[in-house]
Image (cartoon, rainbow, N blue to C red):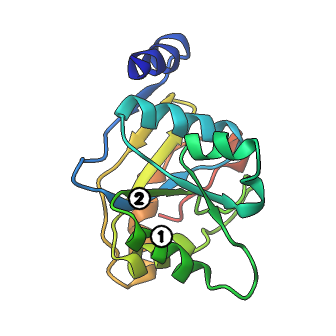
Amino acid sequence: MKQKLYFFIFCTLLGWKVEGTIAPEVKKCVLIAVPHTSWWDFFLGIFSRAILNIEINYLAKKELFVFPFHYFFRWTGGRPLNREKNENKVDSIAAIFLKNEVFRLAIAPEGTRKKVSQWKTGFYFIALKANVPIVPVSFDYQKKVVGYHPPFYPTGNIETDVAFLETYFIGVVGKNPELSYTPKG
């Protein structure tokens, strides 16, 4: 019932569509959502995962997970992350994958909603360390499409792999076009 409601709001009322999916057997992965130019991207992710009826998680600083807000963050797939300087984030996040039977982690590789010329590489090293695929997810506001692309297993050659992953985002326009990431390919 909820899935139909999300579909009605997202697709019928707002005019968006979801293309592609994540195969049910892909229980663990790192999803890279690009471009990330607006806080509205969070809602695109929430609606699209509800329509696909799959669990997708995200990380947020642990300080946000206090009463009563922790209910909302947990309900939307949030997991607290300790962001102290002395802790290796890649190792900490890879450990979360080990502890869970299903964990699909959504990350914006731009690391901000501002214009950037290159991605942060944490997503790549997390996927490599956790031995999980990377699933590109495009938020195209111009076409009103959230696209889920095939899983990609990192090879360890970051330059080649990132160049390949960027090809999924050529021509994809964010909510704020001037802030959209421009792939080098």
Spatial CA span between label 1 and label 2: 8 Å
Residue under the point 29% across and 53% down: 150
**Label 1 SS:** helix
Question: In this orientation, does residue 140 appear?
Answer: no
Is 126 positioned to the left or the right of 114 in the image?
A: left
Label 1 sits on residue: 96
List x then y, in percent, for residue 121. 56, 75
Q: Tag 2: residue type? A: Phe
Mark 1 residue crowding within 10 angstroms, few (<14) / some (14–19) / many (20+) = some
Label 2 sits on residue: 103
**Label 2 SS:** strand
Residue under the point 47% across and 21% down: 6
- Could you tell which of marks 1 and 2 lies nearer the N-terminus? 1
5 relative to 60, above or below: above
108 relative to 156, above or below: above
Q: Are marks 1 and 2 in contact (CB under 8 Å)?
A: yes
List x then y, in percent, for residue 177. 68, 41
Instruction: Tell me, for residue 134, which label it has, or none.
Output: none
Quarter occupied by the N terminus: top left
